[in-house]
Image (cartoon, rainbow, N blue to C red):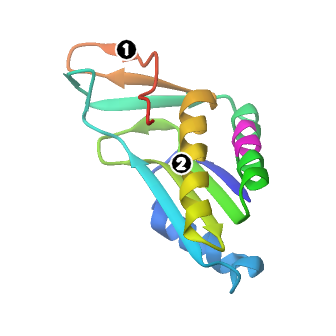
Amino acid sequence: MKVEIFSQPYNPWEWVQSYQDEQAQLEHDFGATLVFVGTMRDFNQGDNVESMFLEHYPGMTEKNLEKIINHAMSEWNLIDVCIAHRVGDVFPGDSIVCVAVWSSHRKQAYEASRMIMETLKSTAPFWKKEKLEQQSRWVEKNTKGF
């Protein structure tokens, strides 16, 4: 399990590959790897968004994400999970979140990944402030994925 918060842009594909290469238990045991990468859009609520500032509560945020991973691992037969998330200034096209799930079979990977993302979006302590053309606004709620 790994949770990492990035304050600068990162390459989610390299991050996942590097993690997988370092983990002995991932050498041959998995039959499925599911990777979800969420990127910043340039629109929200009908407005153009120039950038976004993501805040978090260090320590609390990581513990919350670990709790989400532990819950997923107890519900499904998973081999490993990792989550990366950006904070700070983010621009359209930037990767914000990356969730990688390894399991023996694809069904568990799909189901667990979806639950992890939906729980992360609704409970993880991140706050988003969007910069529009002439104003800024805090994002009051996340989009519902179900």
Judge the density around disc 2: few (<14), some (14-19), many (≥20) Cα neighbours within 10 Å: some
Provide the residue designation for mark 1.
137
Which SS does the magenta portion mostly show? helix
Would you say residue 67 sits in the magenta stretch?
yes
Q: Quadrant of the N terminus?
A: bottom right
Residue 49: x and y in percent read 26, 28
Q: Earlier in the sequence, mark 1 or mark 2?
A: 2
Name the residue rendered at 73%, 63% in the picture.
Answer: 77
Q: Is residue 140 left or right of residue 84?
A: left
Give the answer, above or below, for where 89 lies relative to 5: above
Judge the density around disc 1: few (<14), some (14-19), many (≥20) Cα neighbours within 10 Å: few
Amino acid carrying mark 2 in the image: Arg
Q: Is residue 77 left or right of residue 35?
A: right
Give the image quarter of residue 45: top left
Amino acid carrying mark 1 in the image: Arg
Q: Is residue 124 left or right of residue 69?
A: left
Provide the residue designation for mark 2.
114
Q: Is residue 140 left or right of residue 24?
A: left
Give the image quarter of residue 145: top left
Give the answer, above or below, for where 16 lies relative to 69: below
Residue 121: x and y in percent read 53, 34
Magenta span: 64-68
Residue 34: x and y in percent read 52, 64
